[in-house]
Amino acid sequence: MSVGSSLERRRATPSSSIWTSPAAYIVPPVVALASLLAIWEIWLRIANVPVYILPMPSVVFVRLVSDLGFFAWHGGITLLEALGGFALGAGVALIGATLMAHSRLLERSLLPIAVLVKVTPIVAIAPLFVIWFGFGSLPKIFIAALITFFPVLVNAMTGLRAVEPGALDYFRSLSSSRREIYLKLRLPSALPYLFAAFRISIPLSVIGAVVGEWFSGDRGLGSIVIVAHSNLDMPTLFSAIITLAFLGITLTLLTFYLERKILFWHSSAIVT
Amino acid sequence: MKPAISVKSLSHSFEVNGMILPVLSDVDIEIEQGAFVSVIGPSGCGKTTLLKLIGGLLVPDVGSVTIDGADPKDAQRRKSIGFVFQDSSLLPWRTVAQNIRLPLELNTAAGNRANDDVDRLLDVMDLTEFANYHPHELSGGMRQRVALARALATDPDVLLMDEPLGALDEMTREAMRYEILSVWERNKRKTVVFVTHGIAEAVALSERVVVMSSRPGRILKDIEIDLPHPRDQSLEKSLDFLDYTYLVRDTLKQGASASPFSAVH
């Protein structure tokens, strides 16, 4: 008698309610945003507020669109610095977490130092990095790496240890080596924790890159912000901010999408 | 005949919150090759600990455990032990087929069987159509089937099962009970130690039922089940079967402490 094959696998049927269609997610916020912009525009025209205090959306829009290549190019610089720093910080953090997860001595010696670094505000460290690493992209990458490092380290350490005890027992019952256990059990088990850290670290690394550009920069959106600020060039300032917001949204959506694809097996992704 | 599994004067304790908690007290068991032995006892009596000691996952405080006359860790190195746990412990990021293949990928120094054995195991456990499913898409009963297939993948000499049907509903439990038995009957060389909470299950499946007392666990009685093979559900109607279940139940009651928390069912 076979029980298993009589258990069917039902295909999930999509709900036909209007509230779950894709439009239902996009339309309301777009309408709200458009209304806000309309109110902003109308109020400014009526109140005749000078452009160097608060520009009208139409003015900002013209500035952004007429010079799209400019903002895109600088946005690209900031993006590369942020992602480069993220990759560096995450990579070092993963190596560090692996070493610390396997050695209590290393953990006790190095973790407090990592905490010390973490609690020092990045805006205080940024100018230091500029002095050390010059005016190019390197200090920005290092700042982004530093911001990324601690969340990924802590989450990776937790994740590498958070293996299911039954699964660990199973590996041990076959006399698995530590390397096999690490690659086939610990690392995959740590992925949900890593992604949780990435969700925090990716936007933070953008901030890190921008802050770095404040202190030294002729390139990137951070430097555009600084220059526009000193010139009271509000349309440019707002355009840079909008570009940064767009960067942030895109990265967040990308991370979300990747997480769903890679963590399909995790309880966070399974909707029952 | 040399026993496959030999447990001598085994005692074991755990340290919990700075206190020593004895879980096993002077246990002696000899299991011959190819036997199907159940271990039954109240919660906390150390049955799982006993299984882990036999399988080499724990090292005994006092006494000895041997498999084929040697340290269980030798059997581990030969991949000669197949464990099945209560919660299947499958890797959720691997498909059914990949999970079954896992033991073949580990510790390859021990030598391996060819990959097509995975297909045979899938077929034996009626899982072929589910080969590319992931554990979260399967029911509890199917996951345990995968866990059993996985345990069989290295063709172990010893199968150690810790309440494998414990998390399943009654009907699935009863159906899978006899599936496990038929798998064992087809592979008569395998020695099985089957830990369970269920009295009927223990009597139906095994040739011997070892009844343990509550913590610290010691052997109350080692009951020989003299019922014919091959067995199926109709066995459970016979009077002999009923007598054996009463014997087990009475033995368990004797060993239960006065505490209301040592419930036996």
Image (cartoon, helix red, strand yellow):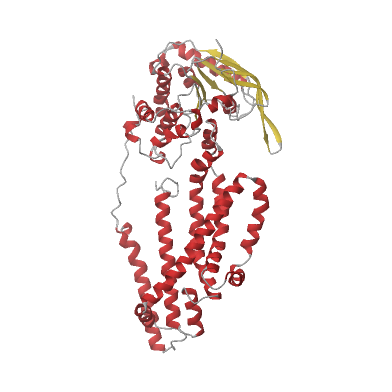
Residue visible at 54% across and 62% down? A145
Count of marks, rendered view:
0
Residue visible at 56% across and 26% down? B55
Residue A69 image-quadrant placement: bottom left
Q: Is residue A19 above or below residue A136?
A: above
Q: Is residue A110 above or below residue B233?
A: below
Residue A89: x, y in percent?
54, 59
Residue visible at 56% across and 66% down? A143
Q: Is residue B212 visible?
A: no
Left or right, A9 with reference to A49: left
Residue A110: x, y in percent?
65, 53
Q: Is residue B93 visible?
A: yes
**Looking at this view, is A5 or B30 the one in front?**
B30
Left or right, B193 with reference to B44: left
Residue A236 image-quadrant placement: bottom left
Residue B128: x, y in percent?
33, 32
Left or right, B207 with reference to B8: left
Left or right, A109 with reference to B119: right
Q: Is residue B165 above or below residue B244?
A: below
Q: Is residue B114 above or below residue B137?
A: above
**Looking at this view, is B75 or B130 the one in front?**
B75
**Image quarter hosting the N terminus of chain B:** top right
Residue B253: x, y in percent?
59, 20
